[in-house]
């Protein structure tokens, strides 16, 4: 037996699996969505495409858990794509004043995402598990609902729509500001978790 032969390599992680492929397709879809928003047309298509993209997020997570296809690439790529499509959509909606999206909303959303991403990267480098919490999932849900309402509100057919006497524009604004409040609360919650973890590891 040749003692100088290299040791048997460990079976590599199958990063190129179906859940990760779906996640990557969602990243590609985001560019199509941004182009449609920039063209200022087909708002119903924009809303439908956004909802479809969000649905693929649910699908890839389900498949990864069910078939034990969770990979390190997926743990990094999935939250990045989620933040990319939501933050990017908010940015592309900014030039449209009737969308209800304001610069302050975008600053708060982007600030929270950068803060949490930085904390996650630092803590997981220390070996801590800084996965999404209930507040983070609620934040994501409200962001998706608020974005969908904003996209729909730009379509002329929704101009006169009301629900129980409340205009669609007001419903959209309530959703947007509720999203902002939960985004701030979620950020504070993640900072609190990070401090607790640092106290334990420190």
Image: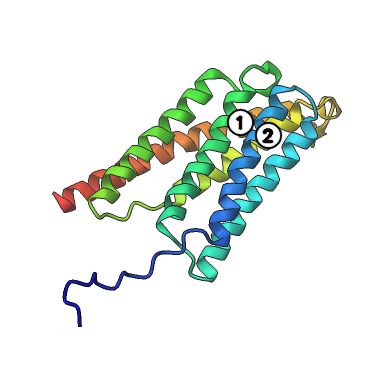
x and y, in percent, of residue 189 in the image: 36, 43
Near mark 1 (Cα within 10 A), the count class, few <14, some 14-19 or many ≥20, is many
Instruction: Residue 33: name its quadrant.
Output: top right
Residue sitting at 62 percent across and 41 percent down? Answer: 28
Residue that label 2 marks: 33
Q: Do the CB atoms of the residues marked 1 and 2 lie less than 8 Å apart?
A: yes
Residue at 58%, 54% in the rendered image = 21
Q: Position of residue 135 (x, y in %)?
A: 45, 47
| Front position in the image: 31 or 8 | 8
Element marked by disc 2: helix
Query: In front: 100, or 118?
Result: 118
C-alpha separation, residue under disc 1 versus residue under disc 2: 8 Å
Q: Is any part of residue 64 visible from this angle?
A: yes
- Against 194, residue 46 (above or below) is above
Residue at 46% x, 27% y is: 108
At 24% from the left edge and 44% from the top edge, which residue is drawn? 195
Give the mark nearest the N terminus, 1 or 2. 2
Answer whether residue 171 is visible to the viewer in this image. no
Q: Residues within 10 Å of mark 2 (few under 14, many from 20)?
A: many
């Amino acid at each position: 037996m040749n003692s100088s032969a290299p040791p048997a390599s460990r079976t590599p992680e199958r990063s190129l699996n179906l859940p990760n492929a779906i996640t990557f397709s969602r990243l590609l879809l985001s560019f199509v969505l941004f182009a449609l928003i920039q063209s200022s047309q087909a708002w119903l298509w924009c809303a439908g495409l956004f909802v479809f993209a969000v649905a693929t997020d649910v699908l890839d997570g389900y498949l990864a858990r069910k078939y034990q296809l969770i990979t390190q690439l997926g743990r990094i790529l999935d939250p990045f794509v989620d933040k990319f499509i939501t933050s990017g959509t908010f940015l592309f909606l900014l030039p449209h004043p009737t969308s209800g999206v304001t610069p302050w909303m975008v600053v708060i959303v982007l600030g929270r995402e950068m803060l949490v991403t930085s904390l996650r990267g630092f803590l997981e480098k220390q070996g801590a598990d800084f996965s999404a919490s209930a507040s983070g999932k609620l934040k994501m849900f409200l962001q998706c609902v608020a974005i969908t309402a904003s996209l729909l509100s730009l379509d002329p057919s929704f101009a006169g729509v009301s629900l129980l006497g409340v205009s669609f524009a007001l419903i959209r604004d309530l959703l947007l500001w509720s999203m902002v409040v939960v985004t701030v609360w979620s950020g504070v919650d993640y900072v609190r978790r990070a401090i607790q973890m640092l106290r334990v590891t420190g």
